[in-house]
Amino acid sequence: MLRFFLSIFVGLTLGLALGLYLGWVQFPRQYINSPITSLTERFKDEYTVMIAAGYLADGDLGGAFDRLRLLGQSNIPAYVQTVTERYITNSRDARDIAYLVALAEGLGRLTPIMEPYRQLRPLEQQP
């Protein structure tokens, strides 16, 4: 019985030591600053919503355009229109849609599907 517990203890100790060595010395995690263009579509959409909310708060269309250019899209107004229409079609949060519609309108890409959300201005209505 003592031999059994001793072998378990030695096995666990060797396993722990080998795991720590491999994790910290041989194959450590490397953090790399990835470009924003490597984000998945979901996170690019969330980034676009954040930029749209910022645009609605400060009205800086040039700044919003510059921030969206980091996504690597060749046609920013068309991209914002696509994201906005996707949010509307998928029945996403109405506040996010209102942010996107305001940005799309600022970029001159207001479409009929966006019209019902045009009057929703979450940040402008707050004191």
Image (cartoon, rainbow, N blue to C red):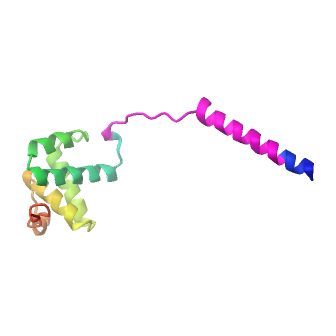
Of residue 81 and residue 66, the one placed in the foreground of this image is: 66
Q: Is residue 64 left or right of residue 39?
A: left
Figure quadrant of the C terminus? bottom left
Task: Reply yes or no: does residue 9 show up in magenta.
Answer: yes
| In-image side of 25 versus 3 (left or right) | left
Task: Say left or right for 31 vs 115.
Answer: right
Give 117 or 33, whichever is nearer the viewer.
Answer: 33
Q: Main secondary structure of the magenta part?
A: helix
| Residue at (14% x, 64% y) in the render | 122
| Count of numbered circles on the image | 0
Residue in front for this viewpoint, 124 or 92? 124
Above or below, 83 against 9 in this view is below
Question: Does residue 13 show up?
Answer: yes
Residue 26 within the segment the image draws in magenta: yes
Residue at horizontal 80%, vertical 46%?
9
In the rendered image, the residue lying farthest to the top is: 26
Rendering coords of residue 21 (x, y %): 65, 33
Q: Is residue 108 visible?
A: no
- What is the x, y in percent for residue 58? 10, 50
Residue 125 percent coordinates (x, y) = 9, 65
Name the residue located 9 percent from the left edge and 58 percent from the top edge: 110
Image position, residue 20 (x, y; %): 65, 37
Q: Nearer the viewer, residue 14 or 66?
A: 14
Q: Examine the image and state in which quarter residue 101 appears.
A: bottom left
At 33% from the left and 53% from the top, the residue drawn is 42
Give the magenta range: 8-37
